[in-house]
Structure formats: C-alpha cells, structure tokens
Image (cartoon, grey):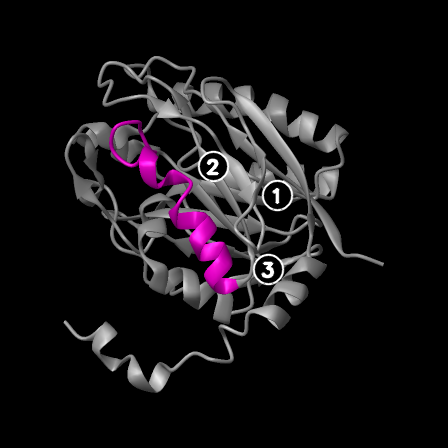
Amino acid sequence: MSRTVKCGLIQAKNIAPTDAPIKEIKKANIEHQMKMVEDAARQGVQILCFQEIFTTPYFCAEQQTRWYEAVEKVPDGPTVKLMQEVAKQHGMVTIVPVYEEEITGVYYNTAAVIDADGKYLGKYRKNHIPHVAPGFWEKFYFRPGNLGYPTFETAHARIGVYICYDRHFPEGARALGLNGAEIVFNPSATVAGLSEYLWKLEQPAHAVANGYFIGAINRVGHEQPWDIGEFYGQSYFCDPRGKIIAEAARDKDALLVADLDLDLIREVRNTWQFFRDRRPDSYDSLVAD
C-alpha cells in the first residue's frame, strides 16, 4: 500500500492597507486565509503550509521600525497558538511562517511546525538573509537563523522547511535531505524581474539532488505603496524527479492541493545513489571563508 499524503499550499495577496495598525493588518490577513484553511480541511489536506510572513505584507520593501510591532513569540504568540487549535480541529499538520521575537530587539524570520494533534514540534529560522535592491532589506528586520536545518517527524511525513532566499543555497537543501526530510516546504515572497527565471530551476534541482518532494509557495499581487514588483504566485509541488506535479495560477489567491506518493522517494534514491556516492571528505573547502 502506497504512502500517499495530501498536501496544500496557500498563496494569497495582502488584503489590508499597509498604513493600518499592525494588529489590524495581521487580523485581516489571518481571517482572509482562514477561508482557504477551511477549504483545505474539506478537501482532506493532511499537511498545509502558509507563505512567508503570511500575516503581513512583505514589509521588507522598506526599512521602518514600525514593523517591529509585528513580532510575536514562537510558540507562545497568538498566531501559533491559533494554528495549534486549527491543526487539532482538522487533524492537519501546519507550517506557520511568522515574524518571531526571541527577546526585545532580536527577531527572526521563522516557521513553526505544528503536528496534526495540535502539538508544537519546533521551528526553523531562516538562515540566509538577503539585503538586495530593490526592496529586499531583510537584514534590517531579521537575524540569521541559529537552529541549523532541522526536520520534523509529523503524523504524516518527516518534513523540513527552507524559507525564500534560502532556496539559492544548495548546502542547506542537502542538509535537510541528510536529516531525513521527505517533503521540504519553501514559503517565499519573490517578485517578477528579479528571480522568476530561477523559480522553477533551483527547487526542482534540489528535489532531484536530494530525492525528496518540494512545496514552493509565493504570494501574489502588487503591494502598495512600495510596488517593488509583481509577486507572481505560481506555487507548486515537484517530485523527487524534479517534475512539477501541481501548480497554482500566477495572479490570484489559491489553495494548491496535491497527493504526494512518498514511496517514490525510495524508488528514486535506489536508482540515483547520490547520498551513497557523496564525498564529504573532499568538501572541506566548501565551508572555508
């Protein structure tokens, strides 16, 4: 009997005015995306991932301290606590990307992982932090992650998380594979004209090199007043052969659902023995400054 897991990705536009109070922005976006959570539950989704910092616009388009108000504790903040209840209610594993406060002034771009019974399993903190023109001023907001590349044994699969800019670095993608990930989720915020040509190249390549599934999420729309470009959606799942097996539209909110046959991982890895044939003894120079 095959191990098939029904997974979902949510891509959505920011629906709140960016000059509104931060609490109102977060409330509006959560309520908006909860409609897709309910749809996911009706479709029997077992693992669901939201987009990068899903409760707000992509505020890294500017450098303003007001956005520090968006931080919350993980796991003790309101969004993660809410999603623990949602996960328990629907028996659904959830990956919840939020702006995390460790202590005052120490903030991370983080994704909490919640099991199907509502138990908090842990978190991943984005390791690679861009500071790229135009409008990706993330070092103003986030410290680099310090938790490595953990994977999480959920009720349905062992999963890993990579966040947005991380996807440009194959080293962490390999670490997630070596740590046992069967599915890697990459919640992102990326615009046309900058990295769109890489969107369907890098992550299928990671899937092939490591023999796992990838769920890649991107938000949609033009976010004012910054308008650094079009968040072009096109969230997708790809399999361990690098084949895109489901893809969302470019320009509208969507819940993307796909059945992932985890038995394909063994089939692919038994054909391509990349983990067996690695030569870590020859890679010292890769971690040199």
Q: Which mark is residue 182?
A: 3
Residue to which mark 1 is pinned? 84
Residue to which mark 2 is pinned? 217
Going by the numbered disc 3, the residue's amino acid type is Glu
Which class describes the residues within 10 Å of circle 1: few (<14), some (14-19), or many (20+)? many
Q: Is residue 86 left or right of residue 104?
A: right
Q: Is residue 25 left or right of residue 104?
A: right
The quarter of the rendered structure image containing the N terminus is bottom right
Query: Relative to 70, is 97 above or below?
Result: below
Q: Nearer the viewer, mark 1 or mark 3?
A: 3
Q: Residue at x 51, y 70 (%)?
A: 179
Query: Relative to 230, is 281 above or below?
Result: below
Q: Which mark is residue 7?
A: none
Asked if residue 201 is among those painted magenta in the image, a careful observer would answer yes
Q: Is residue 183 left or right of residue 186?
A: right
Q: Residue at x 28, y 53 (%)?
A: 128
Q: Is residue 243 left or right of residue 99?
A: right
Query: Relative to 261, is 14 above or below?
Result: above
Q: Which of the 4 quarters of the picture holds residue 147?
A: bottom left
Of label 2 and label 1, which has the lower sequence position?
1
Asked if residue 122 is among those painted magenta in the image, a careful observer would answer no
Of label 1 and label 3, which has the lower sequence position?
1
Residue range highlighted in magenta? 190-210
In this orientation, does residue 74 appear? no
Give the CA distance from mark 3 to mark 2: 17 Å
